[in-house]
Amino acid sequence: MAESGVELFPNQIAIGLSKTGDAINSVDVRHTKTGIITRFNAPVFVDATGDGWLGFWAGAEFRYGREAASEFNESWEKHGDLWSPKVADNKVMGTSVLWNSHKGKNPSRFPSIPWAKAVAKNSDKIQGEWFWEYSNNNLNQIDDAEQIRDHMFRAIYGNFANAKKQPKHALQELKFVAHIGGRRESRRLMGDHIYKMSDATSGTYFDDTVVEEKRELDTHYQKKEKGHSADYLSTALFHHVDMYYIPFRSFYSKDISNLMMAGRCFSCTHVGLTGPRVMNTCAQMGIATGYAAALCKKHNSTPREVGKSHIKELRSLIGYS
């Protein structure tokens, strides 16, 4: 921190922005403990909010849900319309709430919670994994985030309450339940290039490549779509790929001249998101946009101009020869 000269402002949440024409002037943030509002003025901004809030407030074009398979010729073989819809819809990957329990030294009790019965039913698990995940076509992952999280709470506490009725779980104690849901997908802000399934499966190397990955494409859907009784469990479709590459053109807004994006709100299709939505790639996006922001200041340029005129310098900073 001291060597880099970077200033950090922790415990802040973005709450709004000001804009002139197609450029953002400033972003307002609120301190989560004190409530104090601070305004940040800057020549360029990076939206790493996950949900694309800066782009949304600024009026940038975004997508939510699955594209029709025909739009970008995206199709999951052998799975039909499950994740290759004929018509675009609002299905997205869901929110997980992780939890676990452990064996204590003494028998313990757990309260009766009838309010969870409708969700948990008779299931009696004592821990959860990534597939404890909820997505509902009638609920928006952003607007209805608390309702989605609370649905998972009912599943978790209901399961554990059922388990505690059994003598074999007399020593089991609830250890951890996440109080914030882990959201996989919501808004995707559109850039000059929309990263899609074929970009990954073909291994296309772009002149402005700034991110690379070899993790397989991995899209989640609710088990209930296959007839499972629990609506809070998911499963996944996988598509093996070799190394794939993402261009800088997918990391700046096509509408807002001084806005870049890093993380799962980058410019991509639903299927294009399914591989590079994890920490390795999102961290690379942060590095690329951070260096690009420095070049915007150095050359008094927009992100698009950096991509066109200074891409060699940007890639060199990132580590490409």
Image: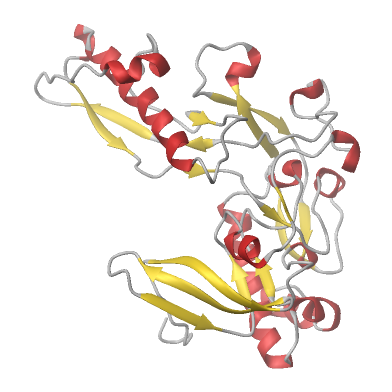
* Residue 45, image x, y percentages: 61, 75
Left or right of 215 on screen, residue 224: left
* Residue 157, image x, y percentages: 31, 24
Q: Which quarter of the rendered picture does the C terminus lie within?
A: bottom right
**Residue that appears at 11% across and 18% down:** 107
**Residue that appears at 63% across and 63% down:** 262
Query: How many marks overall?
Result: 0
- Taking the image as drawn, is residue 97 in sight? no
* Residue 319, image x, y percentages: 69, 74
- Taking the image as drawn, is residue 233 in sight? yes
Position above or below: 188 against 230? below
Position above or below: 50 against 258? above
Position above or below: 116 against 27? above
**Residue that appears at 64% across and 18% down:** 225
**Residue that appears at 56% across and 34% down:** 139
Color encoding of the figure:
secondary structure
